[in-house]
Image: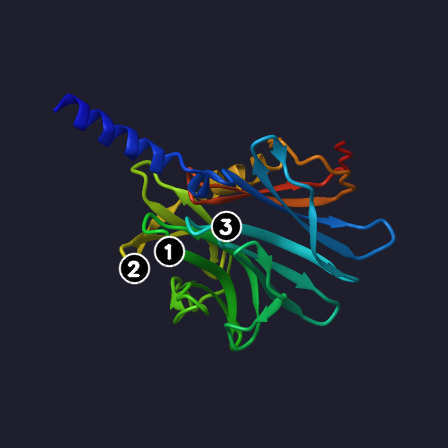
Amino acid sequence: MRKVVGWMVFLWLAVLLSPSLLAARQLMVWAVVREEGGSDLFFSQEEENGWSEPECLFSTPHLIRHPTVVGNREQMIWVAWQEVTPSQEFMWQRIRDRGRWQNQERLQLSAGGDEDPVLFVDSTDTVWLVWSGLEGNDREIFAASWLGERWGERKRLSHNPAGPDKHPLVIRAADGGLLVSWSGFDGSLYRHRKARLVGTHWELERDGDERKRQAYLSGLGKQSPVLPPAKLLGPVQLSLFSTATGIATPYVFNQKLSVQ
């Protein structure tokens, strides 16, 4: 009996620690502003012997903001970002399936334009996209899950006619639940709004402390994750995804970085 149990534990560990599940514990994308103008978007993943050689996924004469990346257990990878042009802002994505990158695709999920993309993976391995979308004259927070070949029906998280809702961020609550946090204008000042993912639907939570949210955001720029072996000339916006949390954490470096 002990031998049977021992073999069962061994097989369970073999599956749990298999390369297919732990092929990339961390994924990273970062946008670099070129000194001569324009921006480039790079990707790298953590491997056994360090970070993979950076790949350039997108180049533009304009500005790239809010890059974000996630991966699922099937080793698919999603990257999303915002391109800022003099006249308009666009949201883009690229997907890697079976080791191959698909062409970049411009997303238009809201009538008046989309920005501030955030990706994450929930406990069921479902990939979610959260963003700020313009509807008429009002900017609201939306979420959609990946349905295999496309983003599903969008779900509106904010209901605030008084002013814009923007800058969504995905965080883990103290109880381990997933929250989307954003800033919502109530006509006089910005409030810290929150929505919790419960199964496949979202529930609004009581407003939080906007000062704590801003302190958290400003603190991200002071942290220093281990960067891949590439020369980065800033300013740099970076997103680091961990399979342990399912969340892509943003980092912003306003100073120039040079990492060999």
Are discs 1 and 2 less than 8 Å apart at CB?
yes
258 to 115, vertically: above or below: above
Are discs 2 and 3 less than 8 Å apart at CB?
no
Q: Distance between the residues labelled 1 and 3?
A: 11 Å
Estimate how packed mark 2 is, as few (under 14), some (14 to 19) or many (20 or more) residues with alpha carbons within 10 Å. Answer: few
Earlier sequence position, callout 1 versus callout 3:
3
Q: Which residue is drawn at 49% across and 65% down?
A: 163
- Tell me the mark number nearer the camera, choosing from 2 and 3: 3
Quarter placement of the C terminus: top right
Tag 1: amino acid: Thr
Residue 33 versus residue 95: which sits nearer the camera?
95
Earlier sequence position, callout 2 versus callout 3:
3
Tell whether 4 sits left or right of 66. left
The disc placed on residue 200 is: 2
Query: For the residue labelled by badge 3, is the local secondary structure a helix, a strand or a loop?
Result: strand
- Tell me the mark number nearer the camera, choosing from 1 and 2: 1
Residue that protrudes farthest toward the right in the picture: 36
Residue 48 versus residue 35: which sits nearer the camera?
48
Quarter placement of the N terminus: top left
Earlier sequence position, callout 1 versus callout 2:
1
Q: How far apart are marks 1 and 2 (CA)?
A: 10 Å
Q: Which residue is drawn at 77% across and 38% down?
A: 231
Report whether residue 164 is seen: no
Tag 2: amino acid: Thr
Question: Total of numbered circles in the picture?
Answer: 3
Q: Position of residue 149 (x, y in %)?
A: 45, 69
Tag 3: amino acid: Val
**Label 1: which residue?**
126
Which image quadrant for residue 246? top left
Q: Where is residue 215 in the image (x, y as percent from the top left)?
A: 53, 37
Q: Distance between the residues labelled 2 and 3?
A: 18 Å
